[in-house]
Amino acid sequence: MRSAVGRYSDHRHPGGMHRGERKGGAMRMIHGRMRSSAGRLAKASLAAAALAAGVLTLGAGTDGAGAATSSAPGVTANSITVGTISTQTGPISANFASLIYGEKAYFDYINAQGGINGRKIDLKYTLDDGGNPSTFTQLAKTLVLQDHVFAVTGVATAFFTPNIFVEAGIPTYGYNVTENWNGPSNLFAAGGSVIYLPAGAPGFAYVVDQTHAKKLAVVAYGIASSAASCQSDANILSKDGYDVVYTDYNIAYPGTTVGVDVQRMKQAGADFVLSCMDVQGNVTMARAIKQYGGGITQLWLNGNDQQTLNQNESLMQGIYFYVAHVPFIAPTSEYPGLKLYITEMKKYEPAYVDDEVAIQGWESAALFAQGVKMAGSNLTQANVIKQTNTLTDFTAGGLTVPTNWTTGHTGHKPPYCGAYIRAVGDKYEPALNTSKKSVFVCFGSINANHPKPESLPPGTPNG
């Protein structure tokens, strides 16, 4: 598995954990990589961009008004039936289960306004693969061939196989941890369908520079989704002149032995550690660092929810986190898209407001809804795919840097953007952003040789 910030689904890097990991979830290491905003052409104000990119109003789409009769599967005069598959039970469910709650909240929000072009979204099927690859394959066939859904609006599993969805030409959305979403025009992973591992290195080098660290340690679980990501970072950082004095890409999940690594980091003189472990391993590492006298700045790619901080405040002071979206603690007065998200999540799914996977479910649902709106009266699966792939500046209503879906299936061009937060007291605060207005930091290449942030791409929320 990988995580959301998918490492760089065309862009991103990891960042927070999600709610389930607080309960001992398995091994989600990186939540989405840095967001790549290459070719984003947004020219509108934030309010206009929000309207164009996912905060929908009722009425006609680009192809004409009204809920005309459609022969597409799952479509009636007043509804569109969709489904979702995620790992909701089993030992790795904590890494994936919450995607559906972001989806449901977004659809509840849209349906409360009357739906899209006269049709409400019916999230009728929320299937559970139980963390079993053969079960996932069977459920995918069930959704497409038996349930005849119009779209699969959320996939969150370590076992995504695109074959049936590509063959059926069905619009498919979700959380990319498997690195096989790229290519087909109907597969829409939240934030872009291409994972580009090197895109995180310049951002991490920037954190190292800003914290004046000199000797780096990098740790990960012995699982491809964790190890590949951090190993890529360490290789680039080392090549570009940073002193990487300790690495371990083979820590056994859930990180109960990481104390030994901390001892070795200290012996090597490390004063900074980048972790691709999940929250359990990270908390164990923070405890060991405190036990052995501190002195090591930490950058976690998972663990930035409020409940984790409430439970581990003394261990987490000063720890940095990468976030692939507008951080939950950003001022809602400056980010209306975040205000909408928090308001509606509190209304419909209050237990998942600060959940890093739930927000990807919201992003996925918003992208599907935008495509349906743009398809208008010509509501076919092919037209929803076609219309969605004309979007050059999708931000899920002002939650992320823009995704350019004309290149989002195959490209990973710079700039690479993300946000950083830091635990201070019992709260998180924005950290290291270079603009007085925006929370995002962007870099123009994968060069990690003391990188300098670049201007935010057009269309960036509050940019």
Image: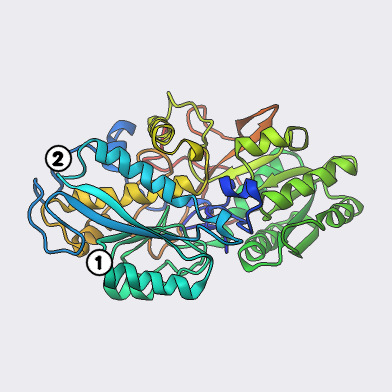
Q: Residue at x 54, y 66 (%)?
A: 131
Could you classify mark 1 by the number of other residues whose Cα lies within 10 Å: few (under 14), some (14-19), or many (20 or more)?
some
Q: Nearer the viewer, residue 460 or 150?
A: 150
Question: Dot 2: what SS?
Answer: loop
Quarter of the image where the C terminus is located: top left
Image location (x, y in percent) of residue 295: 84, 40
Q: Is residue 365 left or right of residue 437?
A: left
Could you classify mark 2 by the number of other residues whose Cα lies within 10 Å: few (under 14), some (14-19), or many (20 or more)?
some
Query: Residue 265: which numbered mark, if any?
Result: none
Work out whether 160 lies above or below 443.
below
Number of marks in picture: 2
Work out whether 196 lies above or below 306.
below
Q: Residue at x 47, y 54 (%)?
A: 414
Quarter of the image where the N terminus is located: bottom right
Work out whether 142 lies above or below 218.
below
Q: Nearer the viewer, residue 379 or 429?
A: 379
Residue type at mark 2?
Gly
Image location (x, y in percent) of residue 45: 31, 32
* Residue underneath mark 1: 148
Q: Is residue 328 left or right of residue 140?
A: right
* Residue underneath mark 2: 59
> Quick check: marks 1 and 2 in contact, CB under 8 Å?
no
Residue type at mark 1?
His
Could you tell which of marks 1 and 2 lies nearer the N-terminus?
A: 2
Image location (x, y in percent) of residue 67: 10, 49
